[in-house]
Image (tube, rainbow, N blue to C red):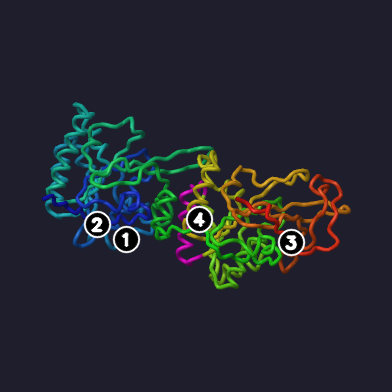
Amino acid sequence: MNTSIDIHRLSTGVPGLDEVLGGGLPEFSFNLIAGPPGCGKTTLAHQIMFSLATPERPAIYFTVLGEPPLKMLRYQQQFAFFDGEAINRRVRFVNLADDKLEGDLHQVLRRIVAEVETHSPGLVFVDSFRSLVAAEARSGGSQGEMLQEFVHQLGISMTSWQATTFLLGEYCSEADANPVFTMADGLFWLRQNVQRNSMVRKLEITKMRGQPTLPGLHTFRIGAAGIEVFPPASHAVATIAGGKAAGPSASRLLTGVPKLDDMLGGGLPRGYSLLVAGPSGSGKSILAAAFLAEGARCGETGVIAAFEQHPDRSRNRLLANLIATGTVALVDSRAPDLSIDEIVRLLLNEIRRLDASRVVIDSLSGFELALAPSFREDFRESMSRLVTALAATGVTVLMTSELEDRYTDLRFSPYGTAFLTDAIIVQRYVEVDSRLLRMLAVVKLRSSAHSNELRLFEIDDDGIHISDRLAGHEGLLGGKPTTADAPGPPATPAGARDE
């Protein structure tokens, strides 16, 4: 009879990292945190240590740096995870600099083992183990052989004392790989890339014995709270949104513009994604605010991701009031070099917090500029991941996109992403009697009949007001358009149904 052993997993205290690890950090594991200088190795180690260290499971942090521990702690204490009261209680720092200078690697190992035997820690950190071996190698001998022997002996010692161990080392690329990596239970590989003055940090769990980790590179950010890791958007939906496989329903949501609801055949189907495209000043953001305000009137909450003008600094007092009262959550990250997974995480956090049913992204143009260059290279892929993640939560999404108004043609999106959305509304300008008038049309509403009329509309302090239909094809070609004598109800011919 086969019996399985349940390995206890520790929560690292690093947002998103437990998900990437496949459920947490295996207790008593022997781990390497590797990467180039400045990528966040020490910060990651300290954040894990302060989160996991308890009186019953104390931690020892061995420093082999040229600088004393006090100097290192001066920088680490700026993070929210730092706990000064834990020092010398549940967290001890031991400086091995003097032992390192003696050039005897075996003496350093004996010092580490002696400290572990004396204090019986549950967590051991060595920063940086590679500098220990480098110092020994300068006095003669093979660095590779000494490194392997050092890690092997340390691993045996820590395992016998049932300590979860982390070795920190500077490796600039995986080309530096050596047999030491095969001896570790877990390998955390941190990277940082600079593109066009843009810095993007990524983490990869290249190895973790006994559990399935999330493959690939995962972006992370170092902020005031410490490190936050952003798992793939698809996995974030399953964990944050509860894994609910939601989709469009038969019910419809009102947009806050009555005649537009008529043009949509009774409103926007719940769970749909709507793209509102138009030139600057055509009223896209006003329509988005009306959509959120109508939700609030119906007792629904919403989320808006503002990538252009902050609502509090705009003249849209309606939207600012909704945010001030907590009916609408604002995602307004001014952090540079965002990744698509980070944006999805921010949105899903707010959707879960408010149990929101409506989401606005204003605008895709600003969203593209907020992304790091590597994510702009294939904006269609980023858009697909965003829309798919939001659709899986069951929310109804309205996205705005700025278009250059060429007066002689109709376009739906500058990114070739119109196929990703369930519905499209296009706004544009037309010239009538030396005046620019606003016009809109519903050009797509998947699996639903909708109006095929071109309708004029105006904007005042009360919002958007749709009026006459635009008559005559000459209006689309830059000529002199005319308006119908009587607006009449919008037509919903069978031919306007989008499959």
Where does label 2 land, which residue? Answer: 91
Disc 3 element: loop
Residue at numbered disc 3? 490
Observer-side mark, 2 or 3, equals 3
Q: Nearer the viewer, residue 144 or 185?
A: 185
Q: Position of residue 147 (x, y in %)?
A: 21, 34
Say which amino acid is labelled 2: Val
Q: Earlier in the sequence, mark 4 or mark 2?
A: 2
Q: Main secondary structure of the magenta part?
A: helix
Q: Which is nearer the eye, 448 or 138?
A: 448
Lower sequence index among marks 1 and 2: 1
Whether tag 1 and tag 4 are in contact, CB under 8 A, the answer is no
Between discs 3 and 4, the one toward the N terminus: 4
Q: Which mark is residue 83?
A: 1
CA gap, disc 1 and disc 4: 40 Å
- Judged left or right of residue 306, residue 71 is left
Residue 233 on the magenta segment = no
Residue of label 4: 391
Q: Secondary structure at mark 4?
A: helix
C-beta proximity under 8 Å, tags 1 and 2: yes
Where is residue 203? Give x, y as percent: 37, 44
351 in the magenta segment: yes
Amino acid identity at mark 3: Pro
